[in-house]
Amino acid sequence: MATPFSAPRTPSAPPRPRLTVATRRRIERSAGILSASALRRMDALDWYRALSAEDRSWVGLVAQAGIGSFISWLRSDGREQPITVDVFGTAPKELTRSISLGQTLDLVRSIVDAVEEEVTQFAANGDEQPLRESVLRYSREIAFAAAQVYAEAAEARGAWDARLEALVVDAVLRGEADDSMQSRATALGWGSVAPVTVVAGGTPPRSPAEAVDALRRAAARHGAESLAAVQRRRFVVILGGTTDAMGVVTDIAGHFGDGPLVVGPTVPHLFAAGRSARAALSGLAAAPAWPEAPRPILADELLPERVLSGDGPARRTLVDRIYHPLEAQPALLRTASVFLETGCALEATARVLFVHPNTVRYRLGRIGVLIGYDLTHPREAHTVLLALAVGRLSEPTRMPWRAGAPGRHDAPGRADAPGRLPGIPGGLL
């Protein structure tokens, strides 16, 4: 009975054609001739001539090992086939990066052709056909062995690449753009990928490996590179090589789990992706505060929620983008403040400012051009209102309620200020 760790039994292979002792001895004595013939055939291959001297020497050793393995294979008279994968054991694993599987099969074909070419010379009378059959069966075995070698190399390379990918994504999330991340990214082929955008969403209901592979295929169909990692309940993806990250994410959104899907800002290269990652993760954490948010959504569209959740960079962005430009134009700042405080009522704003409603409309248009937010839109008005509050809090020295500010009854220097009793400090009233 086969155990879970043993290969299932397969039917015994049919017996190989029997060769006479004379034929086997002739082939054994002609091993050098066969090797030389195989090398001559390989010299006619363009890819072989383009290899480095070291790689050509390794390929030559593989060819000689193939000839030797064939001779040993002929010596065995049993029905079981020997493990021909040992033929490739003489070459380093790195050789699979220099030589493709198709080129390896060309190598096998050269060895087989070299033997078939000399069949009539080696075979004793009556052994020509059995020898040809033996060559064909050996070529089948050696081809399967080559496929096994490349499959094992691909599996090992895939596992190593997956670990490197997870390390690169983790380094981006931590903002660690150091030499180690650069070397790992270069090993993954991301040394020159640009631009880059980080996307954060929920984990899909499948295994992490399946989720990453499916998303990578989907992104590749849009011409985008991707690095991805599943980190518990969040699925973080780094998209590269596309200027339309939002369009790509919209098309591949189904590969993320349920819940918010946040797209960070696009940055020039991978080593600046920490800024995009911080915005995307901050937006993912703050997105529940806006239940009706579109999916996917840009991290910049969640600036108010990110500010409320304590995101310092979002706070500075909101102040720099909205408050400071308006602060430089007091009339527009006053108009925006009054318009928002009166519930976005045009006529009420005009009465408070003692201006014509058309003047308010004109100023609202200038505000939209200046900061890029339309105060007549509820969501954008909410964003500007929060920005003004945050901006005022960021400059406490200008607040009118501080001691000594004009308009306060307890201002120092006014002993006869209304509401004060002689001899009682104003701060106690």
Image (cartoon, helix red, strand yellow):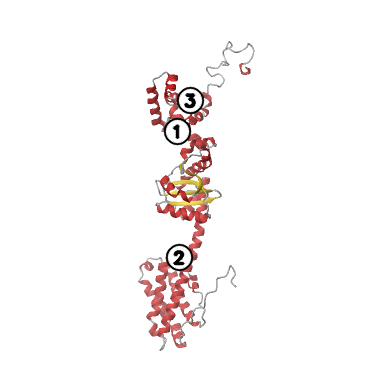
Does dot 1 land on a helix, a strand or a loop?
A: helix
Return the residue at label 1: 380
Question: Distance from label 3 to label 2 (Cα)?
Answer: 70 Å
Drawn side of residue 314 relative to residue 367, left or right: right
Does dot 3 land on a helix, a strand or a loop?
A: helix
Of 391 and 17, the residue lying toward us: 17
Q: Is residue 241 above or below residue 30?
A: above
Q: Which mark is residue 96?
A: 2
Q: Which mark is residue 231?
A: none
Return the residue at label 3: 341
Question: Distance from label 1 to label 3 (Cα)?
Answer: 14 Å
* Mark 1 Cα-neighbour bin, 10 Å: few <14, some 14–19, many ≥20: some
Mark positioned earlier in the residue sequence (1 or 2): 2
Of 394 and 429, the residue lying toward us: 429
* Mark 3 Cα-neighbour bin, 10 Å: few <14, some 14–19, many ≥20: few
Is residue 61 among the parts visible in the rendering?
A: no
Q: How many marks?
A: 3
* Mark 2 Cα-neighbour bin, 10 Å: few <14, some 14–19, many ≥20: some
Q: Is residue 306 above or below residue 30?
A: above
Mark positioned earlier in the residue sequence (1 or 3): 3
Comparing labels 3 and 2, the label whose residue is closer to the camera = 3
Comparing labels 1 and 2, the label whose residue is closer to the camera = 1
The three-letter amino acid code for the residue at tag 1 is Glu
Do callouts 3 and 2 mark residues in contact (Cβ within 8 Å)? no
The three-letter amino acid code for the residue at tag 2 is Thr
The three-letter amino acid code for the residue at tag 3 is Glu
Mark positioned earlier in the residue sequence (3 or 2): 2
